[in-house]
Amino acid sequence: MKNAFGMSGRPIMADPPSTMEDKDDEPPGCSTTQTLPAPAFPTPPPKQGGLVVKFPIYRTNGYHPAARKFRKRFFPNIPSKLWNDWQWQVSHRIRTAAELEAMLQLTEAERQALSLNAAKLPLGITPYYMSLISPDDPHQPLRRTVVPTAHEFYRAAGEADDPLGEEGQSPLPGLVHRYPDRVLLLLQDFCSTYCRYCTRSRVVGHGKIIPSRNRLEKALAYIEETKTVRDVLLSGGDPLVQGDDRLEWILSRLRRIPHVEIVRIGTKVPAVLPQRITPKFVKMLKKYHPLWMSLHFTHPDECTPEAYRACGMLADAGIPLGSQTVLLKGINDSVEVMKSLMHHLLKMRVRPYYLYQCDPITGSSHFRTPVEKGLEIIRGLRGFTSGYAVPTYVVDAPGGGGKIPLTTNYVLGREDNDLLLTNYENGRYRYPDGPCNQEN
Ligand code: SF4
């Protein structure tokens, strides 16, 4: 089958990305970050959310119009059956500069990044996600999240490859034990689409964390022996970009451990590869309740009919869905964009959970905002929309201190027995906070 590049289509992987014993198929990355001068590209204000947000998008069964158009142009001979096959999407990811160049008008900064063979992260974008990317606007939010630029090679003060100190809190490769009652198990370092601001870009896509049975058996033994662990978070890479059987194997093994009360999965699949969520897959997941999911959404443009459908299927399977959003400069750092995203999430039955201050990973200065920007966004949400639409804004403390909530102080002080409070409109209130009369 010919594709847009005049080449034969890559073979469809039967069960991407690897076997339990095989290495990831990504090209090796380079752990050494080259330091280039900081490119001076102005960051325009973020756009208002929504590529095409026609109400009520969440009741449609169709495709995003941009996906239709893109497919017609670049994969004209691909039938819907293949386009909707997640394995086809994974095996036809855009992974080279030439493929990207055929689809986008690249800027100098993008070209420069692609020519440097030392990217922190490999390039990887599913055709579906690529269809949502503007071919001619380098400032389009989704494009900025997945297309590398020269900014990635600039190391600003305070940045580090492992700012959260995960390596120092890993008793075994791919297992992070920071809090007493829960562990983070990295199943693999493969993702269908790589986010340029990824906190784990030091390992993700580099073939460093392989889903080998041997490694996972050791991690399971550690969890089994550590009786305080009641919560296991599966992450990566993206845990959902592997075959049903492999994920079922790990879920069933975890379920056999009596002290593991809940299992959580962190994934960006509903945003970048919604085709992965199939009836057969959710039927399998349902067997392993209580199972929770943290979904990674960044911008309202990701809330397509396809994403709505994927989240709806997961919610129908009884999986509580929460969202994790990273605050990103020029991408979602305005009250309007964030509110639009949070509203979409609620309609998708996803509870906004965390808004993360972007971690100071190496090469992230073009993505990071001051903390005051995050507080301003939370102030712009609290009271102005449903409480369910307001996530908890957190900074993950550099060095491994864990998540620290950041919030505006609504307590102004005390006067005698009164607590002095302010509300979202800057009104002043008193709450009688003296000793209660228990005799009545
Ligand atoms: S999906 Fe998650 S793990 Fe993968 S690149 Fe994005 S942020 Fe990193």
Image (cartoon, helix red, strand yellow):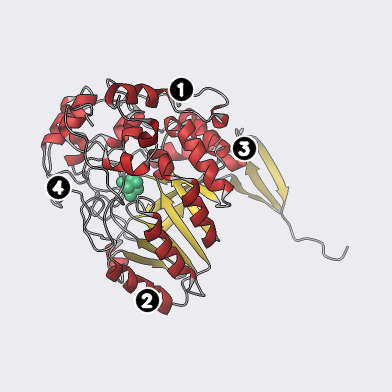
Point out the frontmost of discs 4 and 1: 1
Q: Mark 2 points at which residue?
A: 221
Element class at badge 4:
loop
Point out the frontmost of discs 3 and 2: 2
C-alpha distance separating marks 3 and 2: 43 Å
Element class at badge 2:
helix
Q: Name the residue under label 4.
A: 33
Residue 24 screen position, x and y as percent: 23, 54
C-alpha distance separating marks 2 and 1: 48 Å
Mark 4 or mark 3: which comes first in sequence? 4
Left-right relation of 81 to 335: left
The residue sitting at 60% across, 36% down in the picture is 424
Mark 4 or mark 1: which comes first in sequence? 4
Where residue 187 sits, quadrant-wise, is bottom left
Q: Residues within 10 Å of mark 4 (few under 14, many from 20)?
A: some
Report whether residue 194 is seen: no
Q: Of 194 and 35, which appears nearest the observer?
A: 194
Q: Name the residue under label 1.
A: 52
The residue sitting at 56% across, 47% down in the picture is 315
Element class at badge 3:
loop
Residue 215 screen position, x and y as percent: 28, 69
Mark 2 or mark 1: which comes first in sequence? 1
Point out the frontmost of discs 1 and 3: 1
**Residue 309 vertical placement versus 179 (above, below):** above
Q: Mark 3 points at which residue?
A: 386
Report whether residue 71 is seen: yes
Q: Which amino acid does label 3 sit on?
A: Ser
Where residue 37 sits, quadrant-wise, is top left
Q: Is mark 3 within 8 Å of ligand 1?
A: no
